Structure formats: structure tokens, C-alpha cells
Image (tube, rainbow, N blue to C red):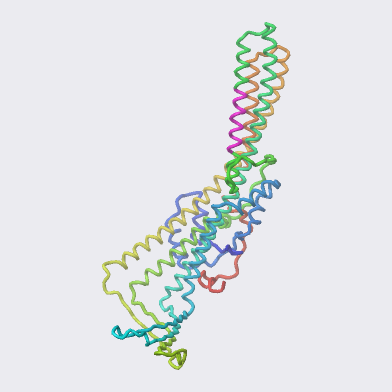
Amino acid sequence: MIKNNMTRGVSVGALAALLSACGHLPIAQPAFEAMSEKRAGMPADWTVAPMTGDSAAIIADYGVFNDAQLIAYVQEALENNRSLRAAIENVRAAEGNLKQTRSGLWPSLRASLGASSSTPVEDFQLDDETYSFSLVGAYDVDIMGDLNASIQASSAGLRSTQATYEQARRQIAATVARAYFAVIEQQLQLDLDRRSFERQTATFRITQTRFDAGSVARDELVLGQSDLANAEDAIFASEASLRSAVRALEISLGRFPQNKLAITGTLPEPPALPPLGLPELTIRSRPDVVAAELNMIQTFAQNRIQRLRPWPQLTSDLSLGLQNTTLNTTDDLFDFDGLAFSIGVALAQTIFDGGAISGAIEASDAGKRRALETYGQTIIDAYGQIVNAIDQFNTLQSRNTALTRASEAAAETLRLGDLRYNEGSESLLNLFQVRSRAENAESALITNKRARLEQWITLHTALGGNPTQSQPLASQATLADKGKHE
């Protein structure tokens, strides 16, 4: 499972690239060279990331909305979402791979027990019985260091999978919150359309009365009928959009889409900007950056294994063995007098392989460069997403001020227009134009409010949660050394 503390870090070169990313993209080549030097082993500045494996940490992020129903839905999704269940199996598979790799650190012990019977074909009696017992213990000494590199690669792979799983959890929580607010927005839009239909109905009754009295022409009556039908059509469309939004929320919760959710919440005011730390600290809080870094460490460890292949391979093994065989009796079958200890050393060198080893090294080197480029691009993308999310959030906040003023002014214009029409001093066409303007302004304000909430979620996700929660890690052990003591 996910450990309580997941370690991660960014090299000095990556930090320099991050700090300069706003001014000149992409990352300069010297920064990549610095990263290449640092990533050969573990960095010396690992930090404890706020990735606990406990859903309470993620649920707490959405407590800022003070909406118990939203919190319950986020918790349900984290428990029941099938994509997330599949993602945790990837973590368990990586744990199994690491366990398998670490087994090379320990000696192996094998025992076997057998019995057989044989007889000449011409005298088929099956009267000769042979019993065997063997016990073999062995230990391979990691002289060349390839086992240590394999453990480091598997450890980094496990932690990369954990970071990917954490990313999936945060994305699912964000998806649920977005879907939840989308449902509320559609409810508000539907309510607006129904109120519009009620107003159109009341207006049409007045128009019909005036037409019957001969005070208005037929064109106003037909115009009223048209707008009334359009208002009814808008209700049908909003109801369909609401059903679709509810189904999307049900799917994100891991339920079958049946339109059975009863959402009672409202659109709250978006919280303030999430706390921002230094750019380095902010980037470190993103699970995708953590995964990219660990993928790079894994690739570098695998590359070291490949680069050992052209050299003479020195191996050493220690073994303790026993092999007993008896005929027609089991006496002395388990006698340990024949237990023997052996030690062996071998030196092997590939003379010619048609370029297989050199080809594998070239492929591994390319993979290492690819991981390094991917890591650098991940940092640039992460920084760009944060900058864009902040800009969009601030823009939506500014637009909200303007849209609020526009909606209030349009609502007042509509109130005055209704009064004038009821008095007979306003034409039906002008009233419909004023009403359309007011309803569009109110609809835009609702959309903006939902968009600001969604953008807050986007920014929060881009920041990787609350980056100020990261703390220095005292130990600077490598992944391989750390893995041995877990």
C-alpha cells in the first residue's frame, strides 16, 4: 500500500530550469547536464510529500467548501471508483516486483524428497526401490553491483507507481467536485428557465387579453406565442442537461448512471487562492513530477545494469549441500554426515554476440535521455499549468465583478420594463429584448460562478494540493538502502 511518507525531490539543475522557465523556454542544455549529473544517484534533498495514502488528506482539501454532501461524494468515489481500484493493483504489482528483486539479497534453501522403483523388463517385479533426499542452500554475492542497481530500479518503480496512484486519486476527487458543481449549475439554470417560462406565460396572458380587446395587433400575439414556446423549449433542454450532469456525477462515483442523485447544495463562493510556496516547493507537490523523477531514477539504474554487460562478469556463490540416496531402505536417508560447503568464483566474458550487448546499451542510453527530457518537459508543463491556472482564476474573478454589475443593471431594467408593459407604455418586442438581456446576464453570472469554482479546483490540482506542507527529510539514504530497512 501507499506508505505514510513518500519521498521526492528536484535537482539543482531542475530548480534552475524552473526559475528561468517564465523567461526562456525550453530548458537550456546546461540545466539538463546538471540534472544528468545529479540523477545518477539519489538526490541529497528529498522531501516528505503530502501523499499519505489516507483519503482524509484529500477529503480535507474539499472541506473549504463547507458542503457535507460534496465531502460524502468525494469519499465515496475514493472508495468505490473502479479505475482507482485498478490503479491500486498496479501499486501492489510493483510491490511484488520489488519483493521479488530484493529476494536476491537473501540466501535460498531448497529441499527435495523422492522415491522410485525399477526392475528389469524380463523379470517385472518392481522390487528395487530407491529413495533420495537433497538439501541445497546457496547465496550469490553481488560483486558487480547489478543486484543493488536492480533493487534501486524496482524501488523507484514502486514509488513512481505510488505517485501515479496518488495522482489518480486527486484527479478523481477533482472530477467529482467538478461534476457536483456542474449539477448545481444546471439546477440553477433550469430554475432560471422555469422562472422565465412563468414570466412569459404571465406576459402572454396580458397580450392575449389585449389582443382580444383589439388593443394590439396579431403580430404581438404571434410574437408572444413564439417566445412562450422558446421558453418551454429551454426548459426541456435544461432538464436534459441536468440529467446528463447527474449521470456524469454518478459515473465518477463508481455508480451505474440512473439519475437517482438528489443534490441539495448550492454554488458557494470560491475560496481564496491556495497557498503558494517557492516555485521549487510548488513543483515538488505535484505527483506527476514525482513520478517523472522516479521514472528517471529507475531508468538510470537500469542503464547502469546494461553498461556492466561488456565487462568481464565476476560472480561468486556460496553453497551448502546434501545429497543422500538409499536402495530399498530409508535408513540413513536423512543423515547429515554428507553435508558439504562449497565456494565458487567465476569470470566470464562475451567474445562475440553480433552486437547484441552494444545494441542493448545504445537502446538503454536512448531511454535514459528520453527519461531526462520527459522529466524536464514535465517540470515546464507543470509550471505552465500553474501559471495558466492562476491567470484564469484571477480573470474569472475580475469578470465576476463586471458580470455582477451587468446582471444587477439588467434586472433593474427588466423590472422597469415589466412595469411599463403592464401600464401599456412598452412594446412587447422591447420587453422581450430587455427580458432576454436580463436572463442572459443572470445565466452568465451562474456560469461564471461555477467556472470560478472549477478553476479553483484546477489550480489546486495543478499545485499538487498544499505545497507548504512539505518538510525536509533528515535521512539521505538511497532508495535501495531505504528499501532494505522497510
Q: Residue 5's x, y, as percent?
A: 60, 64
Quick check: 361 above or below 78? below
Query: Which residues are the magenta region?
Result: 230-244
In which quadrant will I find the N terminus?
Answer: bottom right
Query: Is 243 on the left-hand or right-hand side of 355?
Result: right
What secondary structure is the magenta-colored segment mainly? helix
Identify the residue shown where x is 35% and y is 72%.
Answer: 309
Query: Is 345 on the left-hand or right-hand side of 432?
Result: left
Please say whether residue 234 is one of the residues in the magenta stretch: yes
Query: Is 162 on the left-hand or right-hand side of 27?
Result: right
Which quadrant of the view contains residue 28? Answer: bottom left
The answer to whether residue 62 is seen in the rendering is yes
Residue 1 or 406: which is nearer the viewer? 1
The answer to whether residue 458 is seen in the rendering is no
Q: Residue 446's x, y, as percent?
A: 64, 34
In which quadrant will I find the C terminus?
Answer: bottom right
Please say whether residue 156 is one of the residues in the magenta stretch: no
Quick check: 317 above or below 6? below
Which quadrant of the view contains residue 126? Answer: bottom left
Number of disc labels: 0
